[in-house]
């Protein structure tokens, strides 16, 4: 492999995770950081650290020039973007390769193509992958949008063509609401993503959100089965698990095959996730988008397959072919991931930055806690509230849930409010245990409930 030193262009738990993968491969690490993260665990673990700016992300973690300068000055020969920040920025990928460094992810062209939701839908259609009824081109005119919505039928979803992470989505029930929301959605998209383009999709009632993990080296592509991410709050994932309880073996095979076909269509390189909506009522699934990076929830896939997805994407970026064949990938048991955030569920999930006064993490072969926490760590108020991800494995989903309920009582983070009470309640809920939920379940479940 032609990589010896990796610059980690991210922060928090994913930066720690990338550092661990580099250690496994015998690679040195360079951690860039804002002044607010000077004492972070990621900085402590790295071989070398470079401060690249003040706390605002625009002046540090989104500063392409500063990151490239840090890579050159530190002798790094590759850059891993993690997730968020610049991970799905084609211009950043281009700048890394133009500087003579390996970008640990797909090409800038692939990021741009798949990052545009309308273009990605066309790629999916060309690969024979079913898509949700909706736009075949960007919409900039409300009248065109009204005509399309009338043809596919209400309710519909207005989405930002350049959006992501569940942001910029509006559900509208009729033409009057569509006409009111469309210009607002365009202005919001322009402010958030620098692109006011929109598209429209049919709203599928009681949909399940299922995504397929893919790996590619530009010549060969495989899947690592699927994850279900239907438990969401404000379209932000809260709880993920693998495999998806809602899928039959036949639907699983068809969905995974479709994801691989899409990856092959663009000669994808690295780790990526193809996301689908699954309609339990009809048994049909529909492509919605591709995430051209490692996902927050990748550990559940690692727990059921035994793979190291981050190490694999580093090897591929270093010029190696995929080290595994499709037949090597098997589902072993069940895994559930709970996102533990610095938020207070009892106060409408108000962010709660603060200092970790005590930390107790359960240690066992069937438990994993990906985090950047340590006792005395002061959680900064400038970034995402994710503190860590608790992942539990069991021989079956029932066994996994039982183990999760036990482990949640053992995980202790003191000094600030967290979402542990939310996950404790979910793990004990009969409907969750039965797998009777959809993408809007959690918000219905939370209504009028005290945690």
Image: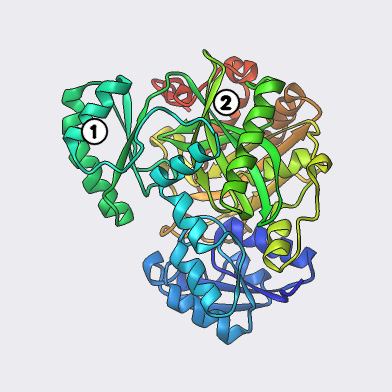
Identify the mark at residue 145; answer none if there is no mark: 1
Name the image colouring: rainbow
Residue 3, placed above or below residue 368: below
User: Image check: 119 left or right of 218?
Assistant: left
**Disc 1 versus disc 2: distance between alpha carbons?**
38 Å
Q: Residue at x 36, y 37 (%)?
A: 136
Provide the residue designation for mark 2.
426
Residue 107, placed above or below residue 283: below
Q: Report whether residue 241 is seen.
A: no
Classify residue 250 by image quadrant.
top right
Helix, strand or loop under label 1: helix
Label 1: how many residues lie within 10 Å, few (<14), some (14-19) or many (20+)?
many
From the top left corner, tell me how far across and down residue 241 is, in percent. Answer: 64, 33
Q: Nearer the viewer, residue 428 or 125?
A: 125
From the top left corner, tell me how far across and down residue 206 is, in percent. Answer: 46, 19
Q: Residue at x 68, y 58 (%)?
A: 313
Helix, strand or loop under label 2: helix
Q: Residue at x 42, y 57 (%)?
A: 381
Q: Nearer the viewer, residue 216 or 414?
A: 216
Residue furthest out toward the top: 281
How many labels were placed on the picture? 2
| Of the two numbered discs 1 and 2 in the rendering, the one whose residue sits closer to the viewer | 1
On the rendered image, what quadrant is the N terminus found in? bottom right
User: Image check: 355 left or right of 254?
Assistant: left
Classify residue 121 by image quadrant.
top left
Identify the mark at residue 324; answer none if there is no mark: none
Say whether disc 1 or disc 2 marks the residue closer to the N-terminus. 1
Answer yes or no: do the residues labelled 1 and 2 have beta carbons within 8 Å? Answer: no
From the top left corner, tell me how far across and down residue 319 is, in percent. Answer: 72, 68
From the top left corner, tell me how far across and down residue 273 is, in percent. Answer: 58, 44
């Amino acid at each position: 492999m032609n990589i010896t030193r990796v610059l980690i262009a991210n922060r928090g738990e994913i930066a720690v995770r990338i550092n661990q993968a580099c250690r496994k491969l015998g690679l040195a690490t360079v951690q860039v950081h804002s002044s607010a993260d000077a004492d972070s665990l990621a900085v402590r673990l790295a071989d070398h650290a470079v401060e690249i700016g003040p706390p605002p992300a625009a002046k540090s973690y989104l500063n392409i020039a500063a990151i490239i300068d840090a890579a050159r000055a530190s002798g790094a020969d590759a850059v891993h973007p993690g997730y968020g920040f610049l991970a799905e920025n084609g211009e950043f990928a281009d700048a890394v390769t133009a500087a003579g460094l390996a970008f640990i992810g797909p090409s800038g062209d692939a990021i741009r193509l798949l990052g545009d939701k309308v273009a990605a839908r066309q790629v999916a259609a060309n690969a024979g992958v079913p898509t949700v009824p909706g736009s075949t081109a960007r919409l900039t005119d409300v009248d065109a949008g009204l005509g399309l919505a009338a043809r596919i039928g209400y309710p519909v979803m207005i989405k930002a063509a350049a959006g992501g992470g569940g942001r910029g989505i509006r559900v509208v029930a009729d033409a009057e609401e569509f006409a009111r929301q469309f210009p607002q959605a365009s202005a919001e998209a322009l402010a958030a993503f620098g692109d006011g383009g929109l598209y429209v999709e049919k709203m599928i009632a009681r949909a399940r959100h299922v995504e397929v993990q893919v790996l590619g080296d530009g010549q060969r592509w495989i899947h690592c089965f699927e994850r279900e991410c239907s438990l969401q709050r404000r379209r932000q994932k809260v709880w993920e698990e693998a495999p998806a309880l809602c899928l039959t073996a036949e639907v699983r095979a068809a969905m995974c095959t479709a994801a691989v076909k899409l990856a092959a269509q663009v000669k994808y390189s690295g780790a990526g996730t193809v996301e689908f909506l699954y309609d339990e009522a009809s048994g049909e699934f529909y492509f919605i988008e591709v995430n051209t990076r490692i996902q927050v929830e990748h550990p559940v896939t690692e727990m059921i397959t035994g793979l190291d997805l981050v190490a694999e994407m580093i090897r591929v970026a270093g010029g190696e072919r995929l080290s595994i064949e499709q037949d090597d990938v098997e589902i072993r048991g069940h895994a559930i991931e709970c996102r533990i955030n610095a938020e207070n569920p009892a106060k409408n999930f108000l962010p709660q930055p603060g200092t970790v006064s005590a930390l107790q993490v359960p240690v066992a072969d069937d438990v994993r806690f990906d985090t950047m926490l340590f006792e005395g760590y002061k959680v900064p108020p400038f970034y995402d509230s994710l503190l860590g991800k608790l992942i539990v494995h069991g021989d079956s989903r029932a066994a996994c849930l039982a183990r999760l309920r036990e482990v949640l009582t053992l995980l202790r983070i003191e000094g600030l409010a967290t979402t542990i009470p939310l996950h404790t309640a979910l793990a004990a809920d009969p409907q969750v245990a039965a797998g009777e939920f959809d993408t809007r379940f959690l918000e219905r479940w939370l209504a009028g409930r005290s945690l």
